[in-house]
Image (cartoon, rainbow, N blue to C red):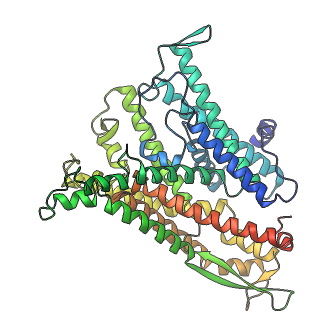
Amino acid sequence: MGWKEAAEPVLTRMPAVRRPEGHVPFKEKLMWTAGILMLYFFLTNITLLGVQTGQGGDLFGQFRAILAGAQGSVLQVGIGPIVTASIVLQLLGGANLLGLDTDDPRDQVLYQGLQKLLVVVMVALTALPMVFAGGFLPAQPSLQLGGLVLEQTQVQLLIFAQIFVGGVLILYMDEVVSKWGVGSGIGLFIIAGVSQRLVAGLVQPATGGFFFDWYRILTGQVEVGSLVSGAGLQTLLIGDGHIIALLTTLLIFGIVVYAESVRVEIPLSHARVKGARGRFPVKLIYASVLPMILVRAVQANVQFMGQILNSQLGSMPSWLGTYSQGQPDGGLFYYLAPIYAPQDWMWWTANVSQEWWQVMIRIGIDVTFMVVGGAIFAIFWVETTDMGPEATAKQIQNSGMQIPGFRQNVGVIEKVMERYIPQVTVIGGALVGLLAVWANMLGTIGSVSGTGLLLAVSITYKLYEEIAEEQLMEMHPMMRQMFGNE
């Protein structure tokens, strides 16, 4: 008996959101999307019962912008388990270890069940060290619930149960948006988290918002210093002035929107309908920026492991890692940590305690990891989402289209696609990785990571395109039949 036969009774019984039987009106899709978004914000504001207030630190740290959720809330783990499960399945699928044919309806059900089961396991594995490893979510010594008094171990179990429920909830919230709403839940939650940070970075007085900091500078509450000596210039550019952060944020917006419009268009014509023509666009960022979540998730898991080891061992061997205020400042885990902000690499400032050569090694590792990892995960993404040359050729063939001047044959179309898709996928993935590191090094408004900003802009752009397409199909019902959306 193979693993599929053994696991089928469990995987086929995993709870699932029912697919709509017919066309879902656009207004109804917007209602579902808005409802899930409101629920997401509501859950991020529900504090975990039993946690000591003001204690512990965010284990995800700078990765919080792309992993969504909120520290100390029911959605503590965010989309981290979903992303990690996706990485594991992509690696297993890429190595053909699962033996699942996604074209087979039975194997599709097994794959979806396996993905959900793996996410549930990842939620538990992520929550366990957060609750039971010291310093991250410290539990109250005792907790009174009505007439029941819970001891510390019971309080920890209660915290774990809340995080577990929140992790499972976000899994099904994502599924509701994917089936009944617009876009995907993961993308929606990333946009929500990043937008919240951007708005706070612009107008929130408590955290030094851009407008309030400039008000303090102009009214003399903040001493800028001499521009000639460089101290004042540094204050305006990377200090309270946030000029570079603002320019970087605007540039990322512009670059991503421009890159989304750069494409190679392959002409198509209908085999039977004379005069019916079209184009298949191969965008520069063909695999989108979503593979960057997977790259950053790998880095987040490495840093996650380092913090767990540091909290459990007390002090690790210096070559492995040394920590200060919860962040690595030496050893292997320091070199593997991404660059988060200008203060992490500008060794000529007082904020960096490492030597210049140590900083350069860290930058080199981060750039290499993001560029190479971006290209590799982009290839994985394209192959596992049926965007590769073979799958694309089948889609074109099934639609009755062909490439003018070539025979109407799947193999011929696939060879034409192989001239463009693999190369564009690698170039686009590497470019997005480079942009993410560059944005992190220069900083952004609201301390949103470069990857988070890239994701938010790209997902918003694609969401805009999808909404425009939905409105077009709503206005012209015949188009729904052409695209199979009826």
In screen coordinates, is 138 left or right of 473?
left
Q: Nearer the viewer, residue 30 or 363?
A: 30
| Quadrant of the image containing the N terminus | top right
Could one spot residue 379 in this view of the protein? Answer: no
What's the residue at 53%, 53% (across, down)? 293
Q: Would you say 210 lies left or right of 466 here?
A: left
Residue 317 in the image, given as x and y percentages of width and height: 29, 33
The location of residue 408, given as percent across then percent down, is 79, 84
In the picture shown, does residue 273 fall above or below 429?
Answer: below
Q: How many marks?
A: 0
What percent of the width, then of the height, locates residue 409? 78, 81
Find the residue positioned furthest to the front. Answer: 219
Residue 219 as seen in the image, left or right of residue 366: left
Quarter residue 260 falls in: bottom right
Residue located at (51% from left, 74% from top): 258
Q: Nearer the viewer, residue 392 or 184?
A: 184
Splitting the image into 4 quarters, where does residue 372 fall? Answer: bottom left
